[in-house]
Image (spheres, rainbow, N blue to C red):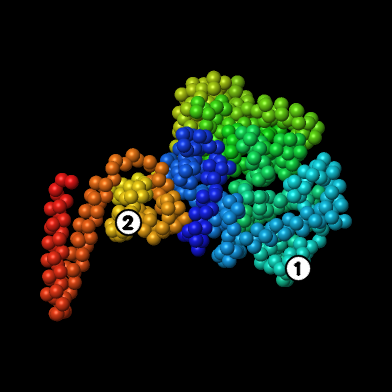
Amino acid sequence: MAGGFSPQLLEEIRARVDIVDLVGQFVNLKRAGENWKGLCPFHAEKTPSFMVHPKKGIFHCFGCGVGGDAFGFLMRQDRLQFPEAVRVLAERAGVALPTERRTEGDGQREALFKTMAQASEFYQDALWNRPEGEGARRYLDSRGIAPEMARRFVLGYAPEGWDHLLGFMKGRGVTEEQLVQVGLVLPRQTGSGFYDRFRGRLLFPIKDGQGRVVAFGGRAMGTEDPKYLNSPETPLYVKGQTLYAFDLAKPQIREKNRALVVEGYVDCLMAHQHGFTETVAALGTAFTASQLGLLRRYCDEVITFFDADAAGKKATQRVEELLEPGTQGLAWAVNRTGTFGDGSALRLKVALLPSGHDPDSFLRKEGAQAFTQRIGEARSLLAYAVETAIGEENTTAPRGKATAFARVALILAKVTDSQEATELARDAALKLGVDPTQLWIEAQRLQGALRKPAPATAPAPAGVNLPSAERDLVSLLVQNPDVRAALLPVLVEEDLAHPALRAILAALKTVTAESPEALMPHLPGDTERGLLAALLVEERAWPDTTPLIAEYLKRFEMRRRARQIRQVSQAIAQAQASGDPALPQLQAQLSDLQRQAEELRELAARPN
Ligand SMILES: [Zn+2]
């Protein structure tokens, strides 16, 4: 697991990385004594149980049991392999890495990132420096996109023609196979050869959380079909998990404690151009739960925009997207009033724009101040969806009332927070002129029908089902240097039955580290790292450890004798069967061992 990096190197990186700083980029952390606390980024929760311990350089969640050091955090957070996490943190810490340390898999992935970066440069060059980019430059101008904004978003232009990019990349030694892998070229339908995917389009690079280009969105500048042509899913790009401009907007989202979510690339650019630098685009009309989860880590409020005509339909659709049963407790995601008592829930709101407007056209026509006003008037998405369902039906007629009743019940059925659902039901029932209980019962009935057979559940906290004596021992070892010094030489892995505790013991024995925190990279997996973090954060007040050490020494000494007795007994049985002349010697050894074991037992029975 240490991936070929020397322990000294890993220790140096760990020591230089401020874990509060690192985690704080992704989680809104608040100070809690010596430590920092926040909402766990790895499971949905309303009250913070995610702790960061700067002194030990570790994090741990009491809710879902994950834990680890800075490397482990980044691996989980950005879905990185260990060597990648080491590289990112080494760079952050200004620690030089030996260059030959690369595995083949990393090399391939990195080659793909490099390919995307080179393609992006090619497209930028075509936009700004080539005669064929003239049309695209004029187009930007006509859309009111300032050149400095276009450069900040590293826009590019894919020239007309079938093989401009292909030729350029081949000249750089990039293979056709790599280009196909990242979705930049396609194999020809007839005959052999390949051709460029993007032709005659304005290109918007889509970046990952680390600011690397992973995909492109291509916009037609005339009436060509389709209006938008995007990269397919590739090893670098998974749809629905990325937000456009997130790398640029992240600091502002934290700063302003809110995110504005728009649909299109141009909407997003225009918002930034007007000073709304906390804006991201959802990359498509659907806004996914995982995108929302990403934003949740940085802010308490997310505002989406709908044009007044389509608003009702879209709000309902969005609520459905985000409240899909089975997406595991998104109750925290949406709420009616906009605030929960503990202030930790995300406020998901909708801002309405006049008919026919999107943020781009609205900003150009009405300006930043009017946009700010619309944001100020934003309302809770969920309450809005319920109101729309009622408003769209003619509730004075029995049939319309019945339809509205059914629609509201369906929305309520998907709200997993029961308090939230109760309040919504009460408001809706009042408007519909029905009994709230009736509405509530219908919602419950639908909820049962909607529930998927195997609902996703949060992972069980590490540490459950652990033999408590073994756990106590490893906890003692991890927290006390004197216990380690006394017990590690006599302990063997077989002394522990639980595999994860065994792995921690093995690491303690083989890795000479000053502090057990440094063992993290040497553990085989997430389970072990989570468990070690849990043991490290326990901070039990140990009494004098001397009698404990003596007790453990006795116990393990007895176990070792028992093991030896078993082994010698087996050897005797074999020797008897085969007529081995060593038999008398073995028998003498056995009686010696038995006598020693007896003495130990007597010793153990005496009070200390
Ligand atoms: Zn958690």
Residue that mark 1 sits on: 171
Residue 499, compared with residue 104, is above or below; it is above
Residue 114, compared with residue 362, is above or below; it is below
Q: Which quadrant of the figure has residue 360? A: top right
- Where is residue 287? Give x, y as percent: 62, 41
The residue closer to the viewer here, 226 or 519, is 519
Q: Going by the image, does 134 lie left or right of 599? A: right
- Where is residue 466? Give x, y as percent: 32, 48
The residue closer to the viewer here, 541 or 395, is 541
Q: Residues within 10 Å of mark 2 (few under 14, many from 20)?
A: some
Q: Which quadrant of the figure has residue 186? A: bottom right
Instruction: Please tell me which residue is depicted at 45% across the width and 28% down the height of the picture.
Output: 441
Q: Residues within 10 Å of mark 1 (few under 14, many from 20)?
A: few
The residue closer to the viewer here, 525 or 123, is 525
Three-letter amino acid code of the residue under disc 2: Leu
Q: Is residue 169 visible?
A: yes
Residue 120, compared with residue 248, is above or below; it is below
Q: Is residue 573 visible?
A: no
Instruction: Please tell me which residue is depicted at 34% across the width and 52% down the height of the picture.
Output: 484
Residue that mark 2 sits on: 488
Q: Which quadrant of the figure has residue 91? A: bottom right
Three-letter amino acid code of the residue under disc 1: Gly
Instruction: Please tell me which residue is depicted at 43% across the width and 55% down the height of the picture.
Output: 513
Residue 181, compared with residue 272, is above or below; it is below
